Image (spheres, rainbow, N blue to C red):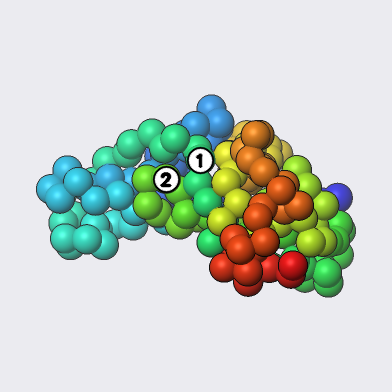
């Protein structure tokens, strides 16, 4: 499998990418309003401040709020199927990421709890990917009423 294509670090993202080299997940935070955001930006999306942006360690846990299974590779060398998901971190921001640690088929459901893991890149940086949180119930263990509420098959 070939390495994923990722953009180079720039003045806004360089500290985020530097944290990934140490397998640390951070989110951008605002010292003016205490808001947190991802991806990193030059201004706070909550209050518009450009002056007091910094970084805060993230717990690395979150919840899957949407996902899709990719069956057709967008370029040669990518193994399929794989799962692309929106993961809402416990701190609030959303990451677009890959889910790993389960079969890509019907194994994942919305509201699954996940934790960060890392996919190392050749240049020393790493991409956050997410795995299921151990101890979470399998789909078969989710009560029928909850499966119906989540829109899952019975």
Coordinates of residue 82 in the picture (x, y in percent): 78, 59
Residue at 24% of width from left, 57% of height from top?
44
Q: Position of residue 137 (x, y in %)?
A: 67, 43
Q: Return the residue at label 2.
A: 90
Using a 10 Å C-alpha cutoff, classify the residue at mark 2 as few (fewer than 14 neighbours), some (14 to 19) or many (20 or more): some
Residue 126 visible in the picture? no
Q: Which residue is mark 1?
A: 61
> Closest to the observer: 10 or 77?
77
- Which of the two labelled residues, at mark 1 and mark 2, occupies the earlier sequence position? 1
Q: Nearer the viewer, residue 2 or 95?
A: 95
Asked if residue 40 is positioned above or below residue 131 in the image, the reply reads below
Residue 69 position within the rendered picture, expressed as x and y whole percent measured from the top left: 75, 66
In this orientation, which residue lies closer to the viewer: 42 or 72? 72
If the image is split into quadrants, where does the C terminus sit?
bottom right
Q: Position of residue 91 (x, y in %)?
A: 37, 45
CA gap between label 1 and label 2 equals 6 Å
Determine which of the numbered discs, if any, sits on residue 119 in the image: none
Q: Secondary structure at mark 2?
A: loop
Q: Residue at x 57, y 68 (%)?
A: 149
Q: How many marks?
A: 2
Crowding at dot 1, Cα within 10 Å, few <14 / some 14-19 / many 20+, comes out as: many
Residue found farthest to the left: 32
Element at label 1: strand
Outermost residue to the top: 22
Can the viewer see residue 139 in this picture?
yes
Q: Nearer the viewer, residue 134 or 139?
A: 139
Labels 1 & 2 near each other (Cβ < 8 A):
yes
């Amino acid at each position: 499998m070939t390495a994923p294509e990722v953009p180079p670090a720039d003045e806004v993202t360089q500290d985020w990418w530097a944290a990934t080299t140490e397998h640390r997940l951070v989110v951008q935070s605002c010292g003016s309003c205490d808001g947190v955001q991802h991806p990193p930006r030059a201004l706070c999306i909550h209050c518009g401040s450009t002056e007091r942006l910094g970084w805060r360690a993230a717990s690395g846990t979150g919840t899957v709020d949407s996902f899709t299974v990719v069956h057709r590779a967008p370029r040669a060398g990518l193994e399929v199927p794989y799962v692309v998901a929106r993961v809402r971190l416990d701190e609030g921001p959303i990451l677009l990421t890959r889910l790993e640690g389960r079969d890509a088929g019907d194994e994942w459901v919305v509201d699954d709890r996940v934790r960060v893991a890392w996919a190392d890149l050749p240049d020393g940086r790493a991409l956050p990917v997410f795995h299921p949180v151990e101890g979470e119930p399998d789909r078969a263990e989710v009560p029928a009423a909850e499966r119906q509420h989540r829109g899952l098959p019975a």
